[in-house]
Amino acid sequence: MKTLRLSPFGLRGFTGDSLTMRAVLDYASAFASFAAGRRVLLARDTRGSSAMLAAAAGSALVAAGCEVLDLGICPAPILQFSVPANGAEGAILIGGGHLAAGWNSIQLVGPDGAPLDPLAGETVLDLYHAGAFARRGWDGLGRLQPAEAFLAPYLEALTRHLGVAAVRRAGFRVLLDPVGGAACPFLAPLTRALGVDAVAVNGEPSAYLARDPEPRPRNARPLAAMMRPLGAHAGFLFSSDASRVSLVTEEGEPVSEEMSLAIAADQALRRAQGPVVVNCCTSRMIDDLAAARGVPLIKTPVGQAHVMAGLADEDGVVGGEGSGSVAVPAFSRAFDGFLLMGLVLEAMAVSGRPLSALVGALRRYHIVKRTVRWSAGGSYRALDVLRERRPDVRDGRADETDGFRVDVADGWVHARASRTVPLVRIISESTDRAVAEARAEAWVRAIEEAS
């Protein structure tokens, strides 16, 4: 049985196995109790299980007296933008994002449009485990109704925020792969608003994802093969909820999702100077960018909620994660793939340089990612092993913001215990791929030898 993964920000599981209707009803009931019967937005992606799970979540919200505005199929960034715009107490998103087919999740959003803050999330978890759910009688039930005209305010705000005039003058052609996910119904109005000629691949909503939904170079090969024949200037590979994006250059090169954040953040900093906030295992490309711009760089634990909290605490200008995510608080408090796409196109238009040149201007680092499975509870003991042995990076500078990281002159290695499954995630970065791989393997061996 695949384990149900609970956190203060939501839950995820394998549909029909660990992610049952009972789990969804109870978790949504806990959030409804936390929301105390106020207005809540509800949205879902296109996965075959999402409509069923959304119906369960909607029923739980109504049973607790909430006024529910149902956005139907809706990308995560548009839902999150719509929460404060509609004066809602929060939102529930049913959607797997970058998770593989068969998995699904419930994601909780707070009243500011950011992921529910950790303290509030812990309260929801307490209600869930205690089964302490608010229930209303027949004369106190809430109601569920379709949300209306929620796209126009988002597009208006997006086009105001971006330098759309320059993008329109450039006459770009772009290829988009939304993996048959929640972005599909929104691509035509989005690209019209940006003034670009767009060709969609996997652009029809589908209950069965057309590819691995994680936007990484290995999943971009079909899109990359079409770039030159179709004369496209840029390609954008989305996660199924449109919160993450990786890029393909006009030359047909799929590039690391780490570069998505670097290019978008650089353009955001050309508009406004201020702190940059990323998680503690984001590529050093961001360190280089912050240093070049002369702005502070703040690193947080992994997760959108932590990055958004850091942006709020530090009055940050731009933030994100190396998974292909970017957030600009002046626009909204969400990881937004559409905003990222707009910033990349704006950078191309304003500079007059092709995407390949923007990519080429970044210092190339090589990232290697590994996982090591341990018994439940053993993951944290594995980190103790690494703190003691520090193979291949004994003289580096240690950091324990989230797990254990060591920085050396040419790169770093980071290990973090998963919060939801019994394994350790190891990421190694260096200017030399062979070095990055060797360090990652050394940390893996150190853990395995101690198990």
Image (cartoon, grey):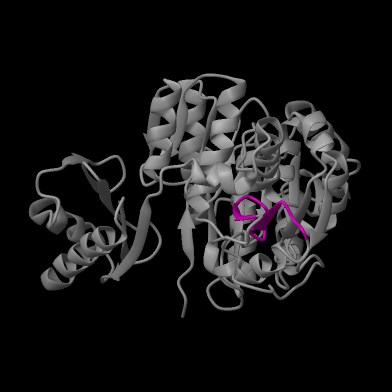
Q: Please say if 428 is above or below 421.
A: above
Residue drawn at 46 percent across, 44 percent down = 122
Give the side of residue 254 with respect to residue 54, left or right: left
Quick one: quadrant of the C terminus? bottom left
Rendered residue at 62%/39% (across/down)? 334
Quarter-of-image position of residue 131: bottom right
Most foreground residue, 176 or 17: 176
- Label count reads 0
Q: Which residues are magenta?
A: 231-249
The one nearer the camera, 277 or 197, is: 197
Residue 108 seen in render: yes
Residue that extends furthest to the right in the rendered view of this protein: 148
**Closer to the camera, 367 or 68?**
367
Residue 20 vs 87, above or below: the answer is below
Residue 288: where, in percent of width, then height? 39, 34
The verdict on residue 306 being magenta is no
Residue 314: name its quadrant: top left
In the rendered image, the residue lying farthest to the bottom is: 1
Residue 262 place in picture, x, y as percent: 51, 40
Residue 239: within the magenta? yes
Q: Position of residue 345 (x, y in %)?
A: 70, 40
Residue occupying image coordinates x 21% and y 60% = 439
Q: Is residue 36 visible?
A: no
Q: Position of residue 49 (x, y in %)?
A: 70, 71
Horizontal side, residue 352 vs residue 123: left or right: right
